[in-house]
Image (tube, rainbow, N blue to C red):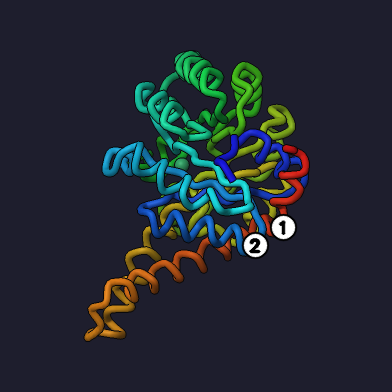
Amino acid sequence: MPLVNMKPLLRDAMENGYAVAAFNLVDYGSTKAMVKAAEELNAPVICQTSAKTIKFYSHKEIVSWVRTAAEDSPVPVVLHLDHCKDLEMIEACAKAGWTSIMIDASELPFEENLEMSKRVRDIADKYGVGMEAELGQIMGVEDDMVVAEEESVLTDPEDAQKFCDALDLSAFACAVGTAHGFYHGDPKVDFDRIEAINKLTKTPMALHGGTGLSDEVFRKAIERGAAKINISTNLKHVFVESFVKYHMENPKDFEPLRVIDAQYQACKLLFSSFIAKFGGENRAPAYLSKAA
Ligand SMILES: [Zn+2]
């Protein structure tokens, strides 16, 4: 089916107590693996792209991969732009076929962040796509931006309400104690804050930094309003390690298709496990009947 807007998808997730998995694609194989994993579980999925990945390839290449993978699939697929600070790139994505865009102006003071995010609201409206924006600073490394633990600012629930009321977001990214990259020590996720923010904003929450969180953390976050959960670091590792592992185990096999198939299967397995863990299984028909 054609790519879908993120908004109704995440509303359904929030209202029904599950989360849609969002994976950062790195090439066509990983894109196809996420759509196939969703299809096998009859679940919706979000294929997302970092600004770095778009610069490495091009808008045209990425849109063609995701559309090709989604076209013959019966499950809803979103193409989302993750953390972007560049309005030109955001508009170029919406124009090229992304069905959701994210503005990350979270390093700016509240009013400036809101101002910048409102400009992206206009872009999202112009192209009829979903939108995510961020308030508070999530620690860790995202693309080439580093936020140290002591610099990270947890999101204030009342500010979150003002922010969300002004923006009508499909997904709200906020800092609740999770981090981009791998965790050093136990993550301190602030569940009360997730609950308070969701109660005031009534907006599906995007939980960033999903790699390395326990099943219990996921469950508690989803119960409190996390409706989109991002997994990136985990995929990077499986993508590289599965390729290397195949070669180490089969040092004389230089058939590229067998090597990339091993990588594809490993990625698909990773995606399936997260989709199932977040409760996405068999959620595609519910979304589709509402959208019809
Ligand atoms: Zn993030």
Q: What amino acid is labelled 2 in the image?
A: Leu
Residue at x 38% of width, y 69% of height? 263
Q: Nearer the viewer, residue 107 or 6?
A: 6
Q: Is residue 274 above or below residue 152?
A: below
- Quadrant for residue 41, please give it: bottom right
Q: Residues within 10 Å of mark 2 (few under 14, many from 20)?
A: some
Q: Which mark is residue 14?
A: none
In the image, taking residue 93 as reference, residue 202 lies left or right, namely right
Residue at x 75% of width, y 38% of height? 292
Q: Residues within 10 Å of mark 1 (few under 14, many from 20)?
A: some
Name the N-terminal-most of marks 2 and 1. 2
Q: Which mark is residue 282?
A: 1
Residue at x 55% of width, y 41% of height? 3
Cβ–Cβ under 8 Å for marks 2 and 1: yes
Q: The residue tagged with tag 1: helix, strand or loop?
A: loop
Q: Is residue 41 above or below residue 223?
A: below
Distance between the alpha carbons at the discs numbered 2 and 1: 6 Å
Report x, y in % for residue 126.
52, 18
**Does the image show residue 155?**
yes
Q: Nearer the viewer, residue 64 or 178?
A: 64
Q: The residue tagged with tag 2: helix, strand or loop?
A: helix
In the picture of the structure, the residue carrying the numbered disc 2 is: 41
Report x, y in % for residue 69.
48, 52
Q: What amino acid is labelled 1 in the image?
A: Asn
Report x, y in % for residue 187.
52, 53
